[in-house]
Image (tube, grey):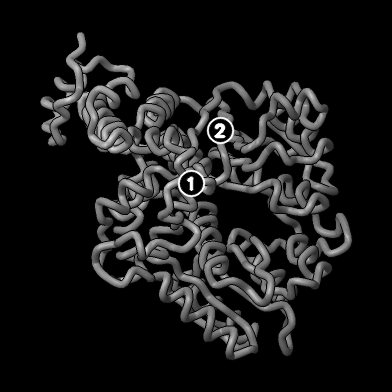
């Protein structure tokens, strides 16, 4: 089932751009000019039990502003995610957006892709918080599409680890470079756990201002600080009986590390400004791209919290160490992009497939997915050729003669990634053939001199020439020598 999102903004151009972008992304969109219009529609939707999955609202509007709107909405629908649009330079508005209970804020002028991604996350959060996950075919298909793809040894080992953890609610620490898919692994751990029918709540601790992170995690009471216009339920409460995913845990401020440790030890906490302890049952899955052991040594991360989180660790390998997965992932993302954009799926030429497997992919799987989308839109034909690749992925055709070892390494890697065996049986004759060509060209075809240059005997060179079916001009003046 597609996401249902509502937009309210008195600026017709903003409404039009957002509606067009979100509908192209497969969402159902309703737009309103004034907050009062949206509230009337929300009342009707409540009676019909057809609530939207999320709402996007501007801050400054005639009549009721965005802050008043979110306060009114959350009185009856506290778990309905609301995204507040604000000017990028308006820091006070951004801070107020978090404090008012907004799911997130969207800066203006906004990036369309960011708006789509944020809207999808808000809708997913609303669905998990408002209603339990069902086991219908649609839901199962949604879960299966989110599964991690990989046939490499490293990925298969990770799958087995997730399988072993499927009947437990033990804490897990996920480590890996940015873009490797840490949140996908966290979702897989949740979906295959006893908590699968309860909420999965994710929060990026590095993306939220330090002053707001405590309220975001633990919630706050009305009036507990300036701008706290209503009671707020924090992520811990939202994740009760389910899983809380703490992304980029290595960036958490020291004072919050202490509070988090107490929650993990006692299973209870206080809202900001609260006097009543709140008991929760939450599984913690944390993730970071940083080396937490080094952070501990530097005094930037609490050692006792590290050991509390590091019960089971899953290390996600970078894409450059998963060469055999690259084409598998590319084909998956190309199919996905074609479906999303309602166009034919692009096919990679062998030249492009071989080449893409040699790249470092600094952005990992995320970069690979973005390239697939780019190719789906920009490649001129059905078959993707080298010329279709984005400029940043194309290398000069000039061969760096001092880099032959890296090129040989890349060639062997391509062969292995294609599943070939006995690779040296294929490579060694080619290598010897090239060496013979170079030596004979240097000596003008004189076998004795060529053999000396290569470190072979004359008979060995003659045998190699016969094996490799080389045609050379005869050299009657060459003296015969032992092999």
Residue 442 percent across, percent down from the top left: 32, 36
The C terminus lies in quadrant: top left
- Give whichever of 99, 292 is nearer the camera: 292
Residue 31 percent across, percent down from the top left: 53, 83
Q: Residue at x 34, y 59 (%)?
A: 386
**Residue contact at pointers 1 and 2, CB within 8 angstroms:** no
Q: Neighbour class for label 1 at 10 Å: few (<14), some, many (≥20)?
A: some
Inspect this view and state whether residue 475 appears. yes
Residue 410 percent across, percent down from the top left: 38, 37
Above or below 76: residue 173: above
The residue sitting at the top extreme is: 482
Left or right, 472 with respect to 277, comes to left
Q: Residue at x 21, y 24 (%)?
A: 425
Label 2: which residue? Answer: 174
Left or right, 295 with respect to 76, comes to right
Q: Residue at x 36, y 64 (%)?
A: 387
- Give whichever of 400, 187 is nearer the camera: 400
The residue sitting at the right extreme is: 226
The N terminus lies in quadrant: bottom left
Q: Neighbour class for label 2 at 10 Å: few (<14), some, many (≥20)?
A: many
Left or right, 480 with respect to 32, comes to left
Label 1: which residue? Answer: 361
Q: What is the secondary structure assignment of the residue under circle 1?
A: loop
Inspect this view and state whether residue 166 appears. no
């Amino acid at each position: 089932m597609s996401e249902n999102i509502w937009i309210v903004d008195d600026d017709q151009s903003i409404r039009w751009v957002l509606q067009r972008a979100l509908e192209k992304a497969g969402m159902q969109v309703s737009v309103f000019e004034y907050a009062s219009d949206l509230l009337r529609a929300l009342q009707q939707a409540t009676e019909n039990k057809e609530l939207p999955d999320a709402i996007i609202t501007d801050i400054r509007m005639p009549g009721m502003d965005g802050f008043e709107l979110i306060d009114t909405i959350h009185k009856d629908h506290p778990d309905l995610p609301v995204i507040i649009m604000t000017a990028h330079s308006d820091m006070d508005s951004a801070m107020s957006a978090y404090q008012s209970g907004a799911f997130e804020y969207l800066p203006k002028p906004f990036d369309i892709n960011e708006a789509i991604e944020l809207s999808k996350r808000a809708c997913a959060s609303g669905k998990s918080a408002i209603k339990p996950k069902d086991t219908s075919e649609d839901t199962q298909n949604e879960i299966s599409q989110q599964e991690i793809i990989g046939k490499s040894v490293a990925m298969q080992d990770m799958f087995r680890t997730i399988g072993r953890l499927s009947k437990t609610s033990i804490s897990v620490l996920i480590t890996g470079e940015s873009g490797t898919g840490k949140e996908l692994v966290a979702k897989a751990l949740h979906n295959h756990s006893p908590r699968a029918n309860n909420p999965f709540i994710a929060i990026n601790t590095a993306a939220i201002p330090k002053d707001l992170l405590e309220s975001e995690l633990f919630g706050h009471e009305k009036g507990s600080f300036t701008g706290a216009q209503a009671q707020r339920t924090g992520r811990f409460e939202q994740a009760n009986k389910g899983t809380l995913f703490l992304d980029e845990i290595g960036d958490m401020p020291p004072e919050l590390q202490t509070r988090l440790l107490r929650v993990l030890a006692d299973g209870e906490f206080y809202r900001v400004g609260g006097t009543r302890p709140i008991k929760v049952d939450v599984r913690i899955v944390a993730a970071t791209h940083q080396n937490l052991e080094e952070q501990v040594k530097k005094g930037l991360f609490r050692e006792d919290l590290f050991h509390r989180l590091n019960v089971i660790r899953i290390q996600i390998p970078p894409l450059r160490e998963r060469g055999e997965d690259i084409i598998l992932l590319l084909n998956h993302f190309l199919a996905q992009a074609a479906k999303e954009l309602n166009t034919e799926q692009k096919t990679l030429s062998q030249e492009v497939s071989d080449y893409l497997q040699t790249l470092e992919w600094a952005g990992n799987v995320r970069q690979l997915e973005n390239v697939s989308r780019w190719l789906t839109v920009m490649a001129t034909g059905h078959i993707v050729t080298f010329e279709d690749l984005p400029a940043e992925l194309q290398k000069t055709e000039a061969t760096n003669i001092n880099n032959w070892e890296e090129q040989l390494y890349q060639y062997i890697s391509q062969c292995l990634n294609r599943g070939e065996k006995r690779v040296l049986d294929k490579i060694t004759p080619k290598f010897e053939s090239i060496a013979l060509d170079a030596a004979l060209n240097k000596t003008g075809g004189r076998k004795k001199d060529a053999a000396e240059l290569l470190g072979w005997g004359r008979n060995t060179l003659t045998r190699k020439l016969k094996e490799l079916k080389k045609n050379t001009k005869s050299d009657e003046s060459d003296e015969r020598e032992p092999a």
